Image (cartoon, helix red, strand yellow):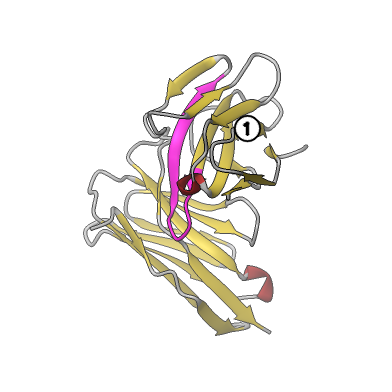
């Protein structure tokens, strides 16, 4: 069984570009969570999605960030017009039911130059 | 004051030593406590999951929670070089809570 798969592993974007981060959950898992780890900080919750629904986006910045989990395909975290402060590691987790979160992906490390 | 405080280390110990990792927290509503292990450039993996106060043992790992002191610990006995990683504490208010509050992590090196 494959675990949570994230791609790309590393992403470099210039300021003002868009970043798209993908997360394929563990097979059969319908709950997906995105967390962000800023340099020298702990992981922070961003958004919780189920198939085709955003359940809780209380941790998402209000502007430029969006997430989706379509019926088919991976979950996407989209960051528009990236700024240097968006540079971080973005982790995705999945679960069969709600919590605890056992399965995190390897993360996407976004660098904004 | 941050919700969860964790000494970032680094912590370096010889192989076979007993390792003690700790976190303090301020939110008395936290009921569920977790320890994750994160190898370099990898995602966190859940090591221990405990509810409320008390001890939980799993092989060489023991998790302790003292809610009266708002203090949690992870002990690793007979530490191995393969234990070298960053250890993250995390906590939540509810069992099904997906909004975990993480510490910054403690980087541990076990020297052969």
Left or right side of B41 for B72: left
Q: Which of A26 and A37 lies nearest the eye of the viewer?
A: A37
Dot 1 falls on a residue whose secondary structure is strand
Q: Is residue B18 visible?
A: no
Q: How many marks?
A: 1
Q: Which of B25 and A42 lies nearest the eye of the viewer?
A: A42
Dividing the picture into quarters, in which one does residue B59 lie? bottom right
Question: What residue is pinned by disc 1?
Answer: A20
Q: Position of residue B39 (x, y in %)?
A: 63, 61
Q: Position of residue A66 (x, y in %)?
A: 50, 26
Q: Residue at x 65, y 57 (%)?
A: B41
Left or right side of B16 for B2: left
Query: Image height check: is A99 above or below B105?
Result: above
Dominant secondary structure of the residues highlighted in magenta in the image: strand
Q: Which of A10 and B32 lies nearest the eye of the viewer?
A: A10
Q: Residue at x 56, y 14 (%)?
A: A52
The stretch in magenta equals: A36-50
Q: Is residue A13 magenta?
A: no
Q: Position of residue B74 (x, y in %)?
A: 45, 65
Dividing the picture into quarters, in which one does residue A71 lie? top right
Q: Residue at x 24, y 49 (%)?
A: B27
Crowdedness of circle 1 by 10 Å Cα count: few (<14), some, many (20+)?
some
Left or right side of B101 for B83: right
């Amino acid at each position: 069984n494959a675990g949570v798969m994230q791609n790309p592993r590393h992403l470099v974007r210039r300021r003002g570009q868009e970043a798209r981060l993908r997360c394929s959950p563990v097979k059969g898992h319908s709950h997906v969570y995105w967390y962000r780890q800023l340099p020298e900080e702990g992981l922070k919750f961003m958004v919780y999605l189920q198939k085709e629904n955003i359940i809780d986006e209380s941790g998402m910045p209000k502007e430029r960030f969006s997430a989706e989990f379509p019926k088919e395909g991976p979950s996407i975290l989209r960051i528009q017009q990236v700024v240097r402060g968006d540079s971080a590691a973005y982790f995705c987790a999945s679960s069969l039911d709600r919590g605890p979160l056992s399965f995190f992906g390897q993360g996407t490390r976004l660098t904004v130059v | 004051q941050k919700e969860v405080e964790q000494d970032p280390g680094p912590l370096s110990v010889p192989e076979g030593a007993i390792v003690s990792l700790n976190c303090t927290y301020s939110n008395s509503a936290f009921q569920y406590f977790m320890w994750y292990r994160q190898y370099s450039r990898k995602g966190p993996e859940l090591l221990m999951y405990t509810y409320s106060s008390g001890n939980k043992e799993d092989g060489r790992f023991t998790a302790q929670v003292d809610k009266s002191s708002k203090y949690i610990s992870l002990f690793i006995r007979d530490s191995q070089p393969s234990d070298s990683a960053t250890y993250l504490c995390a906590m939540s208010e509810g069992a099904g809570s997906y909004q975990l509050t993480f510490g910054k992590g403690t980087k541990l090196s076990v020297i052969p």
